[in-house]
Structures are given as C-alpha cells and as structure tokens.
C-alpha cells in the first residue's frame, strides 16, 4: 500500500472512533449529568528522504464538553444539581471519581449513595451521613446539608486543576489527575442537571462523520482497483 492509502487508513480509524463517540452521546441524551464528548484529531508529518513529506491525521484524544446542562425539577430531597463549574466527589472501588449526576438516596446505614451504591463524599473526603429518622433535610446553595434544622455535612464541589486530564471512566463518572475546590459553584435541592448533549447538532455531526468515512472508503476501493489493475498488467 502506498502513502495515500496509509494516510486514508489512519483517518478512517479516527472517524470510526468518532462515530462510536457520537453514537454514545446520542444514547445518553436523557442521562442526568452526562457530559458530551468530542474527538480531537492530531496531524503527524514525516519528512521523507526523496519523496514529498507524508502527513497523517490520527484521532487519539477525547474532549469533554463541560457546558452547563438544563435543570429538571424533581422535588426529591436528595436530588442535587450543580450550577456553575464543579463536580460531586464519589467513592468507588477504583478510587475517587467526579460526577455531575446528583441523584442520591440514603443507604440502610444512612449514607448518601448513588443509584449504583457509591458513596457521596463531603468537603473533607468523608461519606455524607444522614441520621436515620430525619424528617426534613435542607441543602443550602453553599453545600451545607441540614437535617431537622441542624447542620450535618458540607457537600464538597470539586473541579480538575487541569481540565485536559479529565477522562470519562464509566457512565457519568470521570477521573482527573488532581482536583481542587470549585469555589464559585452553587447547589440546588430537588433538581437534577440534564445531559448537555444537543440532539440536533449531534445527529448532524453523525451524518457529517458518516459521509466523510464513506468518501474515504470510496478512495480506498478505487486505490485497490488501481493497484490490482497494475499488477494484472505487469503480470502478463
């Protein structure tokens, strides 16, 4: 295969990964706290000894869209939504993770957990505990959680020191190399943040990527036909 074929193949592999990413975004349009992802292509240029330089495009990086999503009023006392930049800190078997999904409920032990049973952590990195039998719980915009009028915890909000280190791990959970308090973010009780995926723009992007992939495939088919023709001619 010549240089043009290798260049197209690297582009095709990147477009395939981007198509999978766009499909994942569309599948999570209704997932609370979901962050849209995009593909970043890099260009690699190799200087050849005699031939012109060779340029290849490679889709090798993911970009997380941190745009604020809409808010849905649920009225549930343990549904929390973040306004502004910041994430909840969640304890998982693989370590601490960040999330914008604020759907929690008290466990049998009184700890606030996600639907998967992962514990919500407070500003000091300890699990948030709600005393059993509490009748009324209130959450202040600064993250102060109170039960029957008495403060019981300070829910921490965090952000990655370097946004480029933010990586999707699973569902709505992210990891980051280093985090710091998100001082400007506020919390709302009885709300959940919607996914920030825009359905129309995402479907338009899917069509664009599909057309680009089909064009690359037509070029590879044409190159294959050309090479076969040369081989057959020289073999006579």
Image (cartoon, helix red, strand yellow):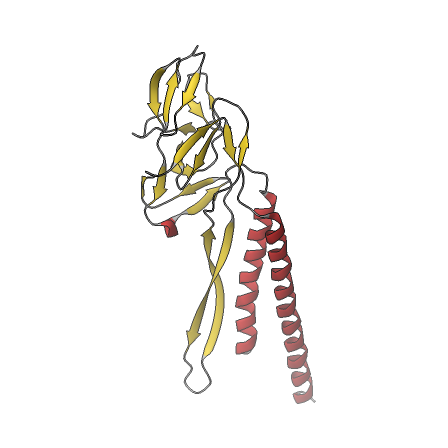
Q: Residue at x 45, y 43 (%)?
A: 169
Percent x, y of residue 163: 37, 49
Which residue is rendered at x = 61% and y = 48% of the image? 199
Q: How many marks?
A: 0
Report whether residue 129 is seen: no
Residue 40, position in %: x, y? Answer: 47, 59
Locate residue 33 relative to residue 176 in the image: left or right.
right
- Left or right of 199? Residue 176 is left
Q: Is residue 165 left or right of residue 4?
A: left
The quarter of the picture where the N terminus appears is bottom right
Q: Position of residue 98 (x, y in %)?
A: 41, 38
x and y, in percent, of residue 129 in the image = 38, 20
Front residue of this view, candidates 100 and 96: 100
**Toward which corner of the image does residue 179 lie, by quadrant?**
top left
Could you say which is closer to the camera, residue 67 or residue 26?
67
Image: 20 above or below 50 = above
Would residue 138 appear left or right of 224 to someone viewing this image?
left
Q: Residue at x 68, y 78 (%)?
A: 225
Q: Is residue 162 visible?
A: yes
Residue occupying the far top of the picture:
133
Q: Is residue 101 above or below residue 47?
A: above
Which quadrant of the structure image shows residue 95?
Answer: top left
Where is 214 relative to 123, above or below?
below
The front one of 189 and 44 is: 189
Image quarter of the C terminus: bottom right
Query: Looking at the image, which is closer to me, 234 or 18?
Result: 18
Residue located 48% across and 65% down the image: 58
């Amino acid at each position: 295969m010549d240089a043009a074929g290798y260049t197209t193949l690297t582009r095709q592999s990147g477009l395939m990964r981007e198509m999978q990413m766009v499909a994942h975004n569309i599948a999570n349009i209704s997932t609370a706290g979901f962050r849209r992802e995009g593909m970043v292509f890099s260009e690699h240029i190799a200087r050849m000894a005699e031939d012109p330089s060779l340029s290849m495009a490679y889709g090798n990086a993911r970009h997380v869209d941190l745009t604020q999503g809409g808010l849905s009023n649920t009225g549930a006392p343990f549904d929390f939504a973040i306004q502004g930049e910041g994430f909840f800190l969640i304890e998982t078997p693989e370590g601490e993770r960040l999330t914008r999904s604020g759907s929690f409920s008290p466990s049998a032990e009184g700890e606030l957990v996600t639907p998967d049973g992962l514990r919500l952590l407070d500003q000091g990195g300890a699990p948030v505990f709600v005393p059993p039998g509490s009748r009324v719980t209130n959450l202040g915009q600064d993250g102060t959680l109170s039960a029957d009028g008495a403060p019981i915890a300070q829910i921490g909000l965090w952000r990655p020191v370097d946004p480029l280190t933010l990586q999707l791990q699973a569902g709505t959970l992210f990891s980051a190399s280093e985090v710091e308090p998100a001082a400007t973010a506020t919390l709302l009780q009885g709300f959940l943040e919607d996914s920030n995926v825009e359905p129309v723009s995402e479907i338009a992007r899917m069509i664009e990527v599909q057309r680009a992939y089909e064009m690359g495939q037509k070029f590879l088919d044409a190159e294959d036909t050309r090479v076969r023709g040369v081989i057959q001619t020289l073999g006579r």
